[in-house]
Image: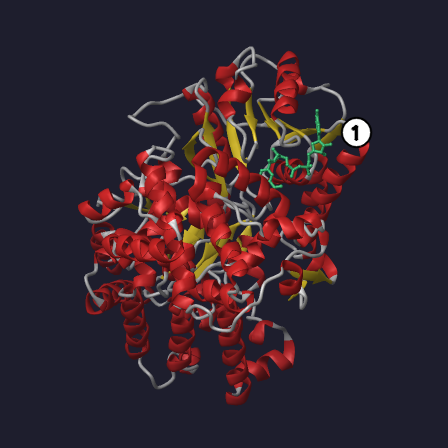
Amino acid sequence: MKHFTINARNNIGYVYFDLLGEKVNKFNREVMSEFKELIDTLKTRTDLDAVILFSKKPGNFIAGADIQLIQSAKNAEEATELARAGQDLLNQWEDLPMATVVAINGTCMGGGCELSLASAAIVMSNDPAARIGLPETLLGIIPGMGGCVRMPWKVGIAQAFDLILSGKTLTGEKAYKAGLADACIQKENFEESVFTWVNSNLSKLKKRERIAKEPKLGGMGGVVGAMLENNPIGRSVVFKKAREGVLSKTKGKYPAPMEAIRVIEEIGTGYQANFRGKKRDQVLLVEAKGFGQMAATDVSKACIQLFFLTEGIKKANGLTDGKTAETKKIASGAVLGAGVMGGGIAHLLADKGVSVIMKDIGLPGLEIGIQSALALFKKSLKRKSITHRQFEQKLNRIAPTTTYDGFKGSEVVIEAVIEKMELKQAVLKELENFLQDDCVIATNTSSLSVTKMQSVMAKPERFAGMHFFNPVHRMPLVEVIRGEKSSDLAVSQIFQFSKQIGKTPIVVKDSPGFLVNRLLMPYLTEAAVMVSEGVRIEEMDPAMLEFGMPMGPIELIDEVGLDVGDKVGHILHDAFGERMSTPNTFSKLLEQKRLGKKTGAGFYLYSGKDKKDKQLDPNIYQILGVNPEKNKITAEEIVDRCVFSMVNEAARCLEEKVVETPQDVDLGMIMGTGFPPFRGGLLRFADAYGVAKIVTRLEELSKKYGMRFTPSEALKKVAARGKFYA
Ligand SMILES: NC(=O)c1ccc[n+]([C@@H]2O[C@H](COP(=O)([O-])OP(=O)(O)OC[C@H]3O[C@@H](n4cnc5c(N)ncnc54)[C@H](O)[C@@H]3O)[C@@H](O)[C@H]2O)c1
């Protein structure tokens, strides 16, 4: 065997899994056939009472099934067969005569978790990197190698739903508390401790007795929880609640979590006592069929494509043509400006283990920055995603200041002061005097030219854009902007640093609006134009929600802030002319200082804690001076006007090389605007709809509504070629 090695210490066998040539262990075809060989060998080892499976990969136990394998299945039947093969293998592992123990000291996902569930015991380390979970529904599929069967058996239905429907992962400590891991032991000297644990639990292990804590049935302890899961009426409550929870989150757009619920319901609870009556194979067949059906959906195909896009980013360095740069892991940074963005960025850095100096011109600014970071850390503490100790540590990483003291120790500085070119240039020139030579400087500008900004700097090459989105802790995208004088090192360092702090970076050319705002602005503008034409907001926002956007365009304008939108709108208008002209719908509200959510009123009115309660202002049409008309245009026309303007602009961006590939556009739109992932991104959507059809539709819209819809030459070229994606 190439990837598995078997050893023994007296009556305890141990196996190392180390997939050659890969950073992580996964189940691909070769591994599956070798795993079968491993099982066959172990079957003959009558000298062994137990066998422990370790991974040789640092930080990883098993990443799961090879997703390319799932993607390669041509239809539901083929995918079902694939699941059956995996199930069969894990059944054989489950049936081995000796006790099987998995020793998890890194990520253990999907198929890895299912292998663990088929083992006699799961031992995890307390290293925060050791995490276990079933993320399949995030890929539009369901666990297909026994996860839907064995997870509810081990942790109860409610807790299994909590894991399977959200795709979340648990640390060793949490998995132990949930009754999923049978032990959580110190990461130091892990392997030795596992041997000791196995030796001292050997008799229980051999009898297959439960060692893990009893599961919290109904997601809670005690009699009520048990009543919920153990009688039909209680159980139906658990299923109903799960379905409601999923629908409220997915709006019915993602079938996989609903299918997981259906499968678990169909399997029933018979499996709790050794499949009571129903044979293991029968219940697994229900799961395999569900898996097959989900794998064949367009949603799962889109989710899997997105997965590969993000995997691609993990391997990329932000440079093209095979170029490399010597980047480093950043330990200390600084942020200039402690406002909305600076405070958010300082919080993010501190959260991800980077010490950060946060500088502002005065104490009031600093106070805002610290308070917003504090509020976010408190939320994490309340949600128990961090401990008190971690809370203190993280908060202490932020050093507020009004001077440049300590900047010499910073490896990266992110400028997030007010959006004014002259101010930014002055700040950057001053800043350079206080830094070490190899410190990289980034600007978080959302609309100003990086090239112009760097033109006043003594060392412009160390400077590039690092455009975060608001709110920083929630929005995954960072646009890395290459100015004319930015060096490869600076671009690559900011790209890698973005990943280090958990963001998804794309490299964008320094041009007005960069990528995301340039695409988003025609969308928002079109929505505002429609309002001024008398299309009802009550129809428009729901139409785009139905399309899959996380919020309607008018609500989004409120969220972004009408002042910000107006500013960016003008910049784009100046740069691109008439097709980007902004409607005066904005100006009427701007005059009244109704800037959106931040001022409590925009198109909507906001009230309550964190301004969470929102309702459309009953007087909004009067204020705007428009007469709305019910069903003035169809929902389809609303969607076409909003979405195809973005597609049209995206084609131009690709031609102008604002970004290099359609993948960049799709990642940017999904991560930066919440464009529905189940559609695979703006351009995957365009390809699926038909680019030529979009051109025809744009021509119609252009005749009806004006030249802004005229299909661009770039889009026509794509239509002639066929698709955005080759
Ligand atoms: N707010 C957003 O949604 C958003 C999104 C992406 C990018 N941005 C960009 O981020 C930057 C900051 O925006 P914001 O919304 O956080 O603004 P803000 O007004 O909330 O904060 C700016 C802060 O900079 C401080 N400041 C001013 N001059 C300074 C100086 N010389 N040194 C240090 N601090 C100074 C101010 O006191 C203030 O606290 C802008 O370039 C903006 O375009 C904003």
Quadrant (top left, top right, bottom left, bottom right) of the N terminus? top left
* The quarter of the displayed image where residue 366 is located: top right
In the depicted structure, whether residue 355 falls above or below residue 3: above
Q: In this figure, which colouring scheme has been used for the structure?
A: secondary structure
What secondary structure is marked by label 1?
loop
Quadrant (top left, top right, bottom left, bottom right) of the C terminus? top left
* Mark 1: C-beta under 8 Å from nearest atom of ligand 1: yes
Q: Residue furthest right?
A: 363
Residue carrying label 1: 362
Label 1 crowd bin: few (<14), some (14–19), many (20+), radius 10 Å:
few
Locate residue 312 relative to residue 159 in the image: left or right.
Answer: left
Q: Amino acid at mark 1?
A: Gly
Q: How many tags in the picture?
A: 1
- Between 633 and 597, which is closer to the camera in this rendering? 633
Rendering coords of residue 290 (x, y %) = 31, 72
Rendering coords of residue 294 (x, y %) = 31, 67
- Between 177 and 354, which is closer to the camera in this rendering? 354
Locate residue 482 relative to residue 214 in the image: left or right.
Answer: left
Can I make out residue 407 in this image? Answer: yes
Q: Residue at x 66, y 32 (%)?
A: 418
- Between 492 and 173, which is closer to the camera in this rendering? 492
- Between 119 and 602, which is closer to the camera in this rendering? 602
Q: Residue at x 32, y 66 (%)?
A: 144
* The quarter of the displayed image where residue 342 is located: top right
Rendering coords of residue 46 (x, y %) = 28, 60
Ligand 1 image-quadrant field: top right
Q: Residue at x 50, y 50 (%)?
A: 525
Rendering coords of residue 302 (x, y %) = 33, 56
Can I make out residue 116 in this image? Answer: no
In the depicted structure, whether residue 51 falls above or below residue 292: above
